[in-house]
Image: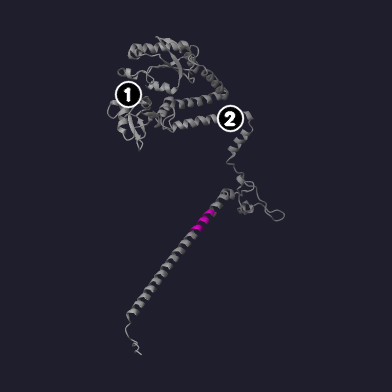
Amino acid sequence: MPDPLPRNAPPTDRESRRERSRDRGDRDRREYSRDRDRRDRSRDRDYDRRDRHDRRDDRYRRDDRDRRRSPPREYRDRGYDRRGGYGGYGDRRRDDRGPRDDRGPRDDRGARESRPAAVLADPYAHLRAKAAAVNKLDPAERARQMKRAQLEARLELMKKQVRSEGGDFDSEEGIWKTLLGGIKQKEIYVGNLAIGQVQTVHLQELFNQSLAKAYPETAAPGCEAVTRINMHSEGKYAFVEFRTAEMATTSLFLDGVELMNSPLQIGRPSGWKDPHKTMEELKRAEEDLKLFDQGVDVEAYRREEAEKLRAAAEEKAADGQPVGEPSKAVVLDNMVSRQDLGDDNDYDDLQLDLKEESNSLSKGLGAVVRVVVPRPPASDLDEFFGRGHYGKAYVEFDSVEAAAKARKGMDNRTFDGRQVVAKFATAAALAEAAAA
């Protein structure tokens, strides 16, 4: 049998490794326990903080609820009765809890008699009186007031829409400038672009050169017609913004022009509103309110007016073609020749003769307001004649009846060997012709 190791013998390598392993395990357990205690303390602090916040919020809500339920202090001091007060609010204390001087004498049973509360002014007395006055009105008068309120609201809403554009509303000229000053009025849509070929510089060059003939002032540096171009990321379409709304309207005549072997599609952008239609609606709203104040039945008046317009629209030209929606303007085809537009004297004589003839045809129903004959520059007469408004004449009257009578008298009339075709023209077409 081998001799045992002495008591103070040094440890072997195996025992040393075991000892180090036990030390590492104890150290890891201590660190884990310390981290766990730290997490528990942090969680407890969060819970305590959350509880304090919840108690504080509950206290705030409770105080706010009591504040809203309680009447003002001056009502409580006067012994305000919650059962007889306005809105159901009142003092929750007994009537004899007021100041000593305000308590009444005791009765035979020893109870104090409460003195009547002071008379308080009703803050909504004017509204109650107004509602009572309306309820006492005759049903017909009440309906009349409601109808007038509707007409006023409609007019104010239209005025607010005009004011939202940032212009003034003091005069008709200011309203018109406001309507034409919007972004949509000065912008056009250009589609069917040659993808990968057409760039913004090509569109800018096209519109600037085309409009320079109609607007010579845009030829100066810094006064170009095009101010901004927003093109699609893939080059499919673009939005072109011009310096004025008239330039944008004139650029619409370039619809169908080829650019890099691709015909352009030019039109108004989405969200565009016809300023002439907006102006007519505004005038119509003002006229409806004036007619209503004069005692006229507005709905019956408008129905009768619509019937007249519908009857006029049913008239057909001799060739069976429709004459268009009745309006105050008439457009005459085959009325103007190249010689009339090329010579200044012939041009002035044409306008004068057309005005005199139109006044004679519409005599008794109205008069001519203006005569518009679009005229391109003399150098471009051969290029633009017969395109768009060039070659047509427009006559504006002060009433629809006068325009209808003059159109009927001019239609199918032979003028200088040409057969004239007369139709009604819209306000937008008349404005475009005047700008051209």
Residue pointed to by mark 1: 215
Q: Is residue 218 magenta?
A: no
Residue 116 in picture, x, y percent from top left: 65, 47
Front residue (pair 240, 356): 240
Residue 319 appears in the rendering: yes
Residue pointed to by mark 2: 145
User: At numbered mark 1, what does the secondary structure look like: helix, strand or loop?
Assistant: loop
Outermost right residue: 108
Q: Is residue 59 magenta?
A: yes
Q: Is residue 362 above or below residue 263?
A: above
Residue 224 appears in the rendering: no
Mark 1, Cα crowd under 10 Å, few <14 / some 14-19 / many 20+, is: some
Q: Which amino acid, by three-letter code, is at mark 1?
A: Tyr
User: At numbered mark 2, what does the secondary structure look like: helix, strand or loop?
Assistant: helix
Residue 429 in picture, x, y percent from top left: 42, 22
- Magenta segment, prevailing SS (helix, strand or loop): helix
Q: Which amino acid, by three-letter code, is at mark 2?
A: Gln
Q: How many marks?
A: 2
Q: Which residues are magenta?
A: 53-61
Q: The N terminus appears in which quarter of the rendering?
A: bottom left
What is the C-alpha distance between the residues marked 1 and 2? 52 Å
For discs 1 and 2, the disc positioned in front in the rendered view: 1
Residue 303 in picture, x, y percent from top left: 56, 23
